[in-house]
Image (spheres, rainbow, N blue to C red):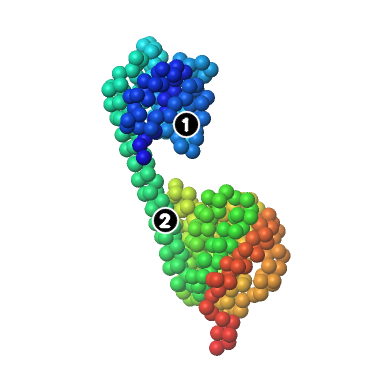
Amino acid sequence: MPQTILAVDDIPENLDVIRAAFASEYRVKVATDGLKALQVARSPDPPDLILLDVMMPGIDGFEVCRRLKSDPRTGHIPVIFVTALGDEKEEYRGLELGAVDYLQKPMNPLLARIRVRNHLALYDRRRELEYAVQMRTIELDRTRKQILKRLSVAAEFKDNETGNHIARMSQCSRLIARYAGLDEGLVEMIYHAAAMHDIGKIGIPDNVLLKPGKLTPEEWVIMQKHPALGAKIIGQHSDPLLRAAHEIALTHHEKWNGSGYPSGLAGEQIPLYGRIVAIADVFDALTSVRPYKKAWSEEDALAQILKDRVTHFDPDLVDAFVKGLPEYREFQLHFRDQIADEDLAM
């Protein structure tokens, strides 16, 4: 499909000249005033370039250009002023507003076609580069998420937990965030970052991490180091996803009343992401089979979460968890662990 030029002029004869100059190579749309031009530019089928008269009744070309460039929907469209004004100050003003060029009236059709073609070529190249950057950004984001997922699986291999624990508690975290009213972009970021919550267990000795019985006070001190170890493994980053993973790893064992670890944070001192993952992690741990315990029933696990809503957990987030529980229940059925309760008796 040919590219589209929007010609804006309040004099029909001038629009006829533009049509004659460009109609053989481009689609030409016209507008006879500034408001109509803005309407066409903001339509679902916007122009690729705008030829804009300066002197028009109502809002002049300068104001039209200002509005176009201040609107994210239209700011990228190249604007060329077509005017009889020969004042350098006026030309400077137009370029300051974001126009890419000036054409003098009466317009030289050959010169106009060359300049329009050049600006459209630059515009196309810029869009190609922007698209390439966008695709690269998407690929990098996908790679980051895969790295987080693989590292979390590595941590699970060392632990008694299964990979399905990651899937379940990540989905539970997603639903809590969603029912708490967070922006969908943050919801998805929490979903991916939650998988790294226990990455620090890689640094816990096996005789402590894999001990089937109750830990001694000395062993418990060692176990409580895994949030800080996880934060150290992830490191400090400017990337929002890695920042979220760092925050979750470090704070998902803090408690609402300040009795958690490693820092004894209380209430809203605990970062939101950590407060969300704390609920998801505990609920899945309670309802999952472990080599040293049977799974709790959902009813008993929910009762425990509700009991701890003011001591361990943010009460508002517990409410969000309860709202999302029916949806989570459907997901949970598809990601049950392979270890059955009967296996524990063998």
User: Observer-nearest residue: 331 or 262?
Assistant: 331
What's the mark number on residue 142? Answer: 2
Q: How many marks?
A: 2
Which percent across, then down, holds residue 287?
Answer: 61, 72
96 displayed left or right of 42? left
Horizontal relation, residue 52 to residue 170: left or right: left
Residues at marks 2 and 1, CA–CA distance in whole angstroms: 34 Å
Can you tell which of label 2 and label 1 is closer to the viewer?
A: 1
Residue tagged by mark 1? 41
Residue 55 is situated, as x and y percent measured from the top left of the image, at 45, 15
Q: Amino acid at mark 2?
A: Arg
Image quadrant in which the N terminus is located: top left
Packing grade of label 1 (10 A; few <14, some 14-19, many >=20) is: many
Q: In the rendered view, tell whether residue 254 sits above or below residue 161.
A: above
Q: Position of residue 269 (x, y in %)?
A: 61, 50
Q: Residue at x 32, y 30 (%)?
A: 24
Question: Image height check: is 9 above or below 142?
Answer: above
From the viewer's perspective, tell me whether residue 269 is left or right of residue 116: right
For the point 54% across and 62% down, the residue is: 170
Name the outermost residue toward the bottom. 346
Rendered location of residue 108, percent (x, y): 30, 18
Quarter of the figure that contains the C terminus: bottom right
